[in-house]
Amino acid sequence: MTPATNGTQPVTVTATVSNTGTMYGAEVAQVYLGFPAALGEPPRRLVGFEKIWLNPGKSGPVSITIDPAATNYPFSYWDSRTHQWAIESGTYIVYVGNSSGLVGNSAGCTAFAYTGEIEVGKGPRNQMPVRK
């Protein structure tokens, strides 16, 4: 993953996908964000995905960028008091898997599953490094 963000710079998540089967096939790597608990947001929000085709026994990289400027506002929540999208400082958990139920430490997670954290701050002074 790329370093922390203040909520305006993109964050890139990379993973390796492996085809452990016997036929040519595809998989869709999905990236989910878990927001700081105090916000009361759903446990995971889909923020990006990438499809990769692989020959049997082969592996390949996927690189998914979480862009704060995207129209789905990946780091934002709707602030009903101010009636606008807002970014909360804190720890956001990044999940990678092939479905929302198969990410991180979940049972049945795939070879490319990853769980990590990024720190989001409201300004450059609040940035913190990525923690794995």
Image: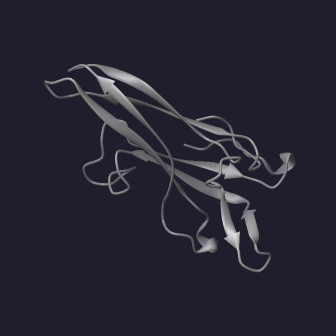
Report the residue that reaches farthest toward the bottom. 81
Q: Quadrant of the C terminus?
A: top right
Place residue 67 in its image quadrant. Answer: top right
Q: Position of residue 42 (x, y in %)?
A: 50, 69
Relative vertical location of residue 1 with respect to residue 77 in this rendering, above or below: above
Left or right of 48? Residue 91 is: right
Q: Position of residue 53 (x, y in %)?
A: 32, 25
At 67% across and 60% down in the image, what residue appears? 76
Relative vertical location of residue 44 with respect to residue 61 in this rendering, above or below: below
Relative vertical location of residue 68 with respect to residue 26 in this rendering, above or below: below
Left or right of 95? Residue 22 is: left
**Marker count (numbered):** 0
Place residue 131 in its image quadrant. Answer: top right
**Most foreground residue, 27 or 118:** 27
At 81% across and 51% down in the image, what residue appears? 126
Q: Position of residue 13 (x, y in %)?
A: 54, 37
**Most foreground residue, 119 or 81:** 81
What colour scheme governs how the chains and residues are painted in the rendered image of this protein?
one colour
**Most foreground residue, 127 or 43:** 43
Q: Quadrant of the N terminus?
A: top right
At 38% across and 55% down in the image, what residue appears? 100
